[in-house]
């Protein structure tokens, strides 16, 4: 069975690991370029870990989308957690409320070709990151 | 109806009657099966011939049945299996035999799919191909229905035994892998090597750091090489762990070199924006070894 979409429930470090491995497999079936695959896995890992660390529970979707001009892999991370108070600050390098490097969100933005974040205290956080696949 | 049946543990008779009622197997079914058994049990030799004619064309045949001795023993057990089936004595011995079939399949790694396909084929041979038309249409239809119920019950025991054993094997394997996951080895006087394979999560990173520091203290090593060529993914958390490990070994007077960075991982680390100044890295193990030799004052020369 061939599927163009993966969906993961994320609530633990184990879930993160599983999502990373599956997303890696998914990406390598679409593009064999190791750097692309690595960037997809790292993005899933960063966004999923943020869910576990800051929201507790959430979801990750990974899909292949054929646009008119290009094939892309889209990663969406969603949670209904507390939201990010100051998005601008969180998007800056080395800001962390969790005592780690604070490079997850800005790093993902650099790894991917499109990046969009929405977050507020009412709805939680939603991050969309897109990688362009130049084949096809 | 939601009692959990542990097939590895069928001891009491109440379990046998529970399973029979769960699969709606009545006294009447048992007597239907026995009646049909009178026709078919004497033809089980023919059944085996038919079955292996079919089996020869299945993908698992050469892998599992090409050995003659093995084949004969399997065929004998298969005949016994159907003798028991048509004898209609559904008791704990009966269940134990089914459990053994599941165990055997799990042990030799013969898939559930091939068991189920085989059971399906057996039913066709026994209930259709070898049927001698000696029963009334109604009695025959009843025999077929009753036999399928019992086959389903058999399958359920075999499947759950199989699954239980497979799960246990997986758990044992991952335990072994965890134990093997931090094999710090002294590869030379003063030089340690730790190859890491798989995904590094924070628990794993902690284990790696502990194993490294203990071995450094034990061996008074001056250089430790952490080879990550088998690591599938690096992110900010992994990089952070690598930095911390480097710092901790330095505190103990031991330089840490991270080797085996693939181009994809190197590029990802840079784009994440990780400050790599504090860690020494090399593309491969050979370079890491050379620098370890030179920093511990070892020179390697080809013998003249
Ligand atoms: N899903 C989320 N819900 C709530 N807050 C979040 C979420 N994701 C990120 N944040 C906030 O944004 C900050 C920056 O996130 P970012 O991933 O860049 O860094 P980090 O997770 O703190 O550290 P690193 O990812 O480098 O380990 C976090 O410290 C946290 O305060
Ligand atoms: Mg983060």
Image: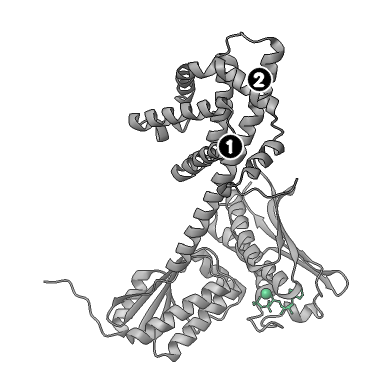
Please state which of the two labelled residues, at mark 1 or mark 2, is closer to the viewer. Answer: 1
| x, y percent for residue A134 | 63, 53
Q: The residue tagged with tag 2: helix, strand or loop?
A: helix
Ligand 1 within 8 Å of the CB at mark 2: no
Q: For the view shown, which residue lies furthest in the front direction?
A: B13
Q: In which quadrant of this rendering is ligand 1 seen?
A: bottom right
Confirm whether residue B8 shows in the render: yes
Q: Which residue is mark 1?
A: B91
| x, y percent for residue A61 | 72, 57
For this rendering, which residue is in front, B160 or B114? B160
The chain containing the residue under callout 1 comes to B
Q: Residues within 10 Å of mark 2 (few under 14, many from 20)?
A: many
For this rendering, which residue is in front, B117 or B271? B117
Going from N to C along the chain, the mark reached first, 1 or 2, is: 1
The chain containing the residue under callout 2 comes to B
Quarter holding the N terminus of chain A is: top right
Name which quarter of the figure residue B253 lies in: bottom left
Q: Which residue is mark 2?
A: B143
């Amino acid at each position: 069975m061939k599927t163009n979409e993966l969906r993961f429930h994320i609530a633990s470090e184990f879930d993160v690991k599983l999502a990373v491995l599956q997303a890696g497999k998914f990406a390598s079936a679409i593009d064999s370029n190791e750097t692309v695959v690595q960037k997809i896995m790292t993005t899933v890992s960063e966004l999923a870990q943020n869910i576990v660390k800051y929201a507790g529970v959430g979801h990750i979707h990974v899909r292949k989308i054929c646009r008119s001009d290009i094939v892309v892999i889209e990663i969406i991370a969603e949670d209904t957690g507390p939201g990010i108070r100051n998005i601008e600050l969180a998007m800056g390098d080395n800001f962390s409320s969790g005592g780690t490097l604070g490079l997850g969100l800005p790093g993902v933005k650099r790894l991917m070709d499109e990046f969009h974040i929405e977050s507020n205290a009412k709805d939680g956080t939603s991050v969309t990151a897109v990688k362009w696949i130049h084949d096809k | 109806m939601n009692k959990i049946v542990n097939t590895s543990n069928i001891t009491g008779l109440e379990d046998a009657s529970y399973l029979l009622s769960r699969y709606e197997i009545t006294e009447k079914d048992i007597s239907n099966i026995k009646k049909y058994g009178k026709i078919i049990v004497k033809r089980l030799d023919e059944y085996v011939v038919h079955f292996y004619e079919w089996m020869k064309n299945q993908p698992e045949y050469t892998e599992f049945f090409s050995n003659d001795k093995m084949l004969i023993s399997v065929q004998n057990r298969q005949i016994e299996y159907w003798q028991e089936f048509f004898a209609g004595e559904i008791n704990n011995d009966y269940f134990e035999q089914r459990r053994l079939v599941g165990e055997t399949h799990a042990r030799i790694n013969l898939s559930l799919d091939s068991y189920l396909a085989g059971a399906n084929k057996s039913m066709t041979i026994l209930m259709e191909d070898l049927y001698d038309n000696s029963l009334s249409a109604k009695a025959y239809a009843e025999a077929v229905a009753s036999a399928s119920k019992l086959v389903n019950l058999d399958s359920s025991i075999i499947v759950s035994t199989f699954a239980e054993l497979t799960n246990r094997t997986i758990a044992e394997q991952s335990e072994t892998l965890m134990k093997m996951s931090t094999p710090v080895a002294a590869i030379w006087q003063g030089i340690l090597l730790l190859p890491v394979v798989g995904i590094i999560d924070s628990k794993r990173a902690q284990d790696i750091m502990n194993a490294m520091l203990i071995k450094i203290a034990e061996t008074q090593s001056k250089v430790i090489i952490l080879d990550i060529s088998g690591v599938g993914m690096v992110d900010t958390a992994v990089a952070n762990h690598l930095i911390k490990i480097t710092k901790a070994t330095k505190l103990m007077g031991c330089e840490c070199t991270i080797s085996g960075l693939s181009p994809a991982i190197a590029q990802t680390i840079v784009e994440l924006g990780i400050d790599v100044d504090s860690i020494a890295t090399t593309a491969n193990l050979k370079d890491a070894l050379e620098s370890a030799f030179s920093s511990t004052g070892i020179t390697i020369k080809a013998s003249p």
